[in-house]
Image (cartoon, helix red, strand yellow):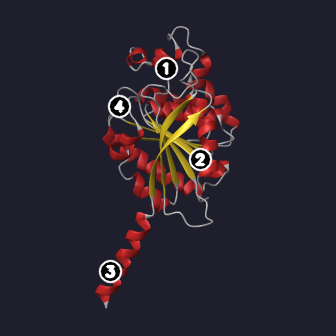
Amino acid sequence: MKNLVSIVCVLTVSAQLSAQKVTHQEVFSAKMNKTVKTIIITPDVQQGATYPSVYILHGYSGNPERTIKQDIPDLVQKAQEYKTIYVLPDGNYNSWYVDSPLVKDSQYQTFIGQELVDFVNKNYPVKNDKKTRGILGWSMGGYGAVNIGTAYNHTFGIVGSSCGALDFNSFGEGYTHYQVDKVLGSAISLNPKFLTDNKVKTMATAEQQYIFDCGTEDTQMIEMNRKFHKKLTDLKIQHLYIESLGIHDPKYWSRSLSEQLTLFDRFFKL
């Protein structure tokens, strides 16, 4: 009898997991006049139920396929565990998730913050309110999450950045190495509105939750994250800041992002 019960339980779990979907979408952007590859991960959807959603932005040179295979390999499992819909847009390798003043078909701030959210709201059973919608990313995507999350602070209730590239002014050679100049122009003539430091005034009154983390051996990003943490602290802007052992690699951010998603889930349930 015990064996029969075990078999039934296993079959039930398998049926639930098989009902999960990893959907590859081509989402049209009117702003850019092109489609954007997007992966949408849903839990086992129950009829009549709606779910929180998290928009996940990959780092420089990444893509959604790599995200689910390497960067956050437990993401499909987490969608089921947390009953959350995860939305992974392709950031076009080096878009930096901005509305580029130079490249007409690189308007990713508007696409993700407005067009993609509208598409998901219309086509997936998501809860359509700020309290149950979040955005996070790492490296380039960490910058993107803060940039888009603060620009659309009435859309996203929680914003997370892991080892984010938060300060173009201290990027040095990285500014051209990571092709920021391709979408924003030279560092010398950079419009101040693209600097993360200039988001703090909005953050002070946006009524959002913020999470930042970085590896202590991440020589590329640690100092700019510490600097931003201090700025927020000095201005008494509530946020969670975490440092732990790690360098700028998938081993670090796959752990940190998984932990952030746990915190996102707790926020959605408050």
Q: Which picture quadrant has residue 104?
A: top right
Q: Kindly check if marks 2 and 1 are in contact, taking CB atoms under 8 A apart as contact.
A: no
Measured from the top left, where is residue 154 in percent x and y? 69, 41
The alpha-carbon separation of the residues under discs 2 and 1 comes to: 31 Å
Which label sits on residue 7?
3
Q: Nearer the viewer, mark 2 or mark 1?
A: 2
Q: Earlier in the sequence, mark 2 or mark 1?
A: 2
Q: Earlier in the sequence, mark 1 or mark 4?
A: 1
Q: In this figure, which residue is indicated by the disc labeled 1? A: 168
The alpha-carbon separation of the residues under discs 3 and 4 comes to: 47 Å
Measured from the top left, where is residue 202 in percent x and y? 67, 32
The alpha-carbon separation of the residues under discs 1 and 4 comes to: 16 Å
Label 4, residues with CA under 10 Å away: few <14, some 14-19, many ≥20: some
Q: Nearer the viewer, mark 1 or mark 4?
A: 1
The answer to whether residue 245 is seen in the rendering is: no
Q: Is residue 86 left or right of residue 198?
A: left
Which label sits on residue 120?
2
Label 3, residues with CA under 10 Å away: few <14, some 14-19, many ≥20: few
* Quadrant placement of the N terminus: bottom left
Amino acid on which the number 4 mark rests in the picture? Asp
Front one among 47 and 238:
47
Q: Earlier in the sequence, mark 2 or mark 3?
A: 3
Which element type, helix, strand or loop, lies under badge 4? loop
Q: Nearer the viewer, mark 1 or mark 3?
A: 3
**Residue at the left extreme, as displayed:** 3
Vertical placement of residue 159 versus 195, above or below: below
Q: Is residue 244 left or right of residue 193?
A: left
